[in-house]
Amino acid sequence: MTSSDLRPNVVMELDDYSSTFELLTLDFKARVKIHNYEVKKLGEDIRALFNFASDKMFFKLIDM
């Protein structure tokens, strides 16, 4: 019998979740902060790209 034939065991039981609820809450809050930071940086990158493209277009139009 190979290891892929065996049923996987659960890592955490229901009691483990209740005892680590505070850690799960802290983990969730940290993940939300990371997500918000990444979305903010994405917005900054998109704005920079838009500004670059619009400036390039503007200068092309003036040179004509």
Image: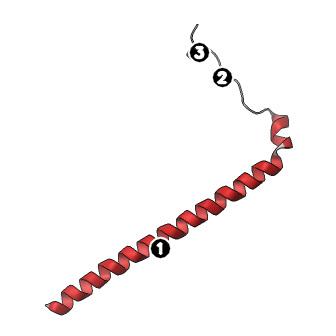
Nearer the observer: mark 1 or 2; the answer is 1
Query: Which residue is disc 2 drawn over?
Result: 8
Q: Position of residue 58 (x, y in %)?
A: 26, 87
Q: In what element is the residue under mark 2?
A: loop
The circle on residue 44 is 1
Is 51 left, or right, of 11 in this rendering?
A: left
Vertical placement of residue 50 versus 8, above or below: below
The circle on residue 3 is 3
> Furthest-left residue in view?
64
Determine whether the residue tagged by mark 1 lies in a helix, strand or loop.
helix
Quarter-wise, where is residue 57 in the image? Answer: bottom left
Q: Residue at x 77, y 53 (%)?
A: 25
> How far apart are the alpha carbons under marks 2 and 3?
9 Å
Lateral position of residue 36 relative to residue 23, left or right: left
Q: Amino acid at mark 2?
A: Pro
Q: Earlier in the sequence, mark 2 or mark 3?
A: 3
The image quadrant where one finds the N terminus is top right
Residue at 36% across, 74% down = 49
